[in-house]
């Protein structure tokens, strides 16, 4: 299962790494690909994870989530 998280507030490579690390700490996340240019993260999951858990992880890292959708 994959989800796309649209994220506002990232401006550099450090931001990308910070978001990646935050999402990797969420249970059932197996892989994370963050795009600074696309302003999003693609999260691969071993099982379904509630959207609010992904949103909370990104927002606790200091960025804004504008949308989450299943791919």
Image (cartoon, rainbow, N blue to C red):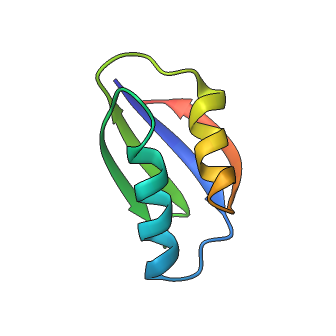
Relative depth, front residue between 3 and 45: 45
In the displayed image of the protein, which residue is found farthest to the top? 47
Residue at point 62%, 59% (across, down): 61
Relative depth, front residue between 20 and 1: 20
Q: Would you place residue 58 above or below residue 15 in this image?
A: above
In the displayed image of the protein, which residue is found farthest to the bottom? 12
Specify the quadrant of the image occupied by residue 44.
Answer: top left
Q: Would you place residue 49 above or below residue 5 in this image?
A: above
Residue 3 in the figure: left or right of residue 29: right
Specify the quadrant of the image occupied by residue 2.
Answer: top left
Q: Position of residue 67 (x, y in %)?
A: 67, 41
Q: Would you place residue 54 above or below residue 59 in this image?
A: above
Q: Would you place residue 14 above or below residue 48 in this image?
A: below
Q: How many marks?
A: 0
Q: Position of residue 38 (x, y in %)?
A: 50, 64
Relative depth, front residue between 14 and 39: 14
Q: Position of residue 19 (x, y in %)?
A: 50, 59
Residue at point 39%, 40% (across, down): 43
Quadrant where the N terminus lies? Answer: top left
Residue at point 60%, 72% (across, down): 10
Q: Position of residue 34 (x, y in %)?
A: 41, 60
Residue at point 45%, 36% (across, down): 26
Specify the quadrant of the image occupied by residue 31.
Answer: top left
Quadrant where the C terminus lies? Answer: top left
Relative depth, front residue between 43 and 20: 20
């Amino acid at each position: 299962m994959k989800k796309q998280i649209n994220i506002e507030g990232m401006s550099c490579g450090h931001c990308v790494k910070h978001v990646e690390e935050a999402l990797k700490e969420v249970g059932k996340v197996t892989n994370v690909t963050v795009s600074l240019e696309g302003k999003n993260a693609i999260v691969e999951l071993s099982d379904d994870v509630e959207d609010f858990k992904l949103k909370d992880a990104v927002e606790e890292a200091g960025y804004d989530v504008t949308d989450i959708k299943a791919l």
